[in-house]
């Protein structure tokens, strides 16, 4: 091997090592530029290694680069995707879009046997009605314009507190569901999930992050500066995934062409010398 190619190979090795290690660490990641930053106890599948998250806190990115949390369905054995609006690591809260505006998505949110079932979460019971007129402005009615038309409107009322007198006679019962929400929360906008394990509030109050402590299953507080080095979304992960093989190919191709050119020039010079010596 020509000595002039050694620096290129050394540079390629360290560049590949740097990119690989950067992609494999537990720095915060996101599915898109306006999506929540995801870090311990959560992790994004295919973007962050398993050691970066606590069991049961896996998130994913959909085709629209939205952050997705899968929860068991209350009506079937499958799970349903919920869009994550935001995450409060200090309060250990995650806010999800209930998805009520989607077809057949007025369902109870099942958190049984999930990472959020062991918290002191208040589950609220709501009853949905289909009305021939718009009653969304009546208290304590929650209106759903996205499900309403000019001919009818869909409303919801807290089941345990509403008086039958609140419901007009021209409203038909649709469905009764149970969802997690704060007393002052807005049902039509987001639902609130709380986790108690792992407990990282003390770390967050100190301006630090929580992460695994070796392999003993415990967590430890680390400096938050360790998580500010790289914050990459799915686009960045994809670019790295495509860019590294491409870079290696280009470097290998350049080396190969350089080697072939050197061999060709050597053969050409040798023929010229032989031709000159035969004259």
Image: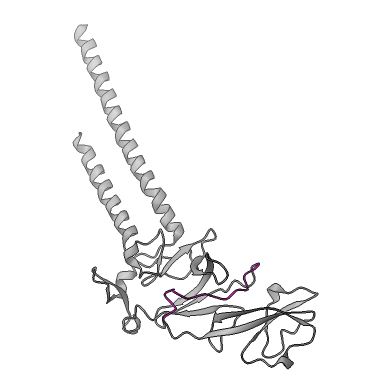
Pick out the residue farthest to the top.
Answer: 279
The spot of residue 115 in percent (x, y) is 41, 75
Can residue 26 be seen here? The reply is no
| Percent x, y of residue 276 | 22, 11
- Predominant secondary structure, magenta span: loop
Q: Is residue 193 left or right of residue 135?
A: left
Residue 29 in view, yes or no = yes
The one of 91 and 100 positioned closer to us in this rendering: 100
Q: Nearer the viewer, residue 187 or 234?
A: 187
Q: Quadrant of the N terminus?
A: top left
* Number of numbered discs overlaid on the protein picture: 0
Residue at the location (29% across, 23% down)? 264
Q: Residue at x 62, y 70 (%)?
A: 105
| Residue drawn at point x = 28 percent, y = 55 percent | 18
Q: Magenta segment, which residues?
A: 103-118
Closer-to-camera residue (239/101):
101
Answer with the quarter of the image where residue 228 lies: bottom left
Left or right of 238 on screen, residue 136: right
In this picture, residue 135 sits left or right of residue 11: right
Within the magenta stretch, is there residue 54?
no
């Amino acid at each position: 091997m020509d000595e002039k190619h050694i620096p290129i190979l050394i540079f390629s090795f360290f560049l590949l090592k740097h990119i690989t290690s950067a992609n494999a660490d537990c720095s915060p990641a996101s599915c898109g530029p306006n999506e929540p930053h995801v870090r311990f106890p959560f992790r994004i599948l295919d973007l962050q290694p398993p050691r970066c998250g606590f069991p049961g806190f896996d998130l994913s990115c959909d085709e629209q680069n939205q952050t997705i949390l899968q929860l068991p369905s209350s009506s079937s054995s499958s799970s349903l995707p919920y869009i994550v609006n935001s995450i409060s690591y200090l309060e250990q809260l995650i806010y999800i879009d209930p998805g009520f505006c989607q077809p057949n998505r007025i369902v109870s949110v099942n958190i049984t046997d999930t990472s959020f079932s062991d918290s002191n979460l208040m589950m609220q019971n709501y009853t949905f009605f289909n009305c021939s007129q718009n009653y969304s402005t009546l208290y304590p009615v929650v209106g759903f314009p996205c499900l309403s038309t000019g001919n009818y409107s869909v409303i919801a009322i807290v089941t345990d507190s509403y008086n039958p007198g609140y419901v007009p006679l021209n409203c038909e019962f649709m469905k009764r569901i149970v969802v997690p929400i704060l007393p002052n929360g807005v049902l039509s906008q987001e639902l609130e999930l709380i986790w108690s394990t792992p407990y990282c509030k003390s770390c967050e109050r100190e301006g630090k992050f929580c992460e695994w402590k070796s392999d003993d299953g415990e967590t430890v507080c680390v400096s938050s500066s360790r998580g500010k080095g790289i914050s990459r979304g799915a686009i960045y992960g994809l670019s790295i995934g495509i860019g590294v093989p491409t870079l290696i190919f280009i470097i290998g191709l350049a080396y190969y062409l350089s080697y072939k050119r050197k061999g060709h020039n050597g053969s050409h010079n040798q023929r010229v010398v032989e031709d000159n010596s035969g004259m």
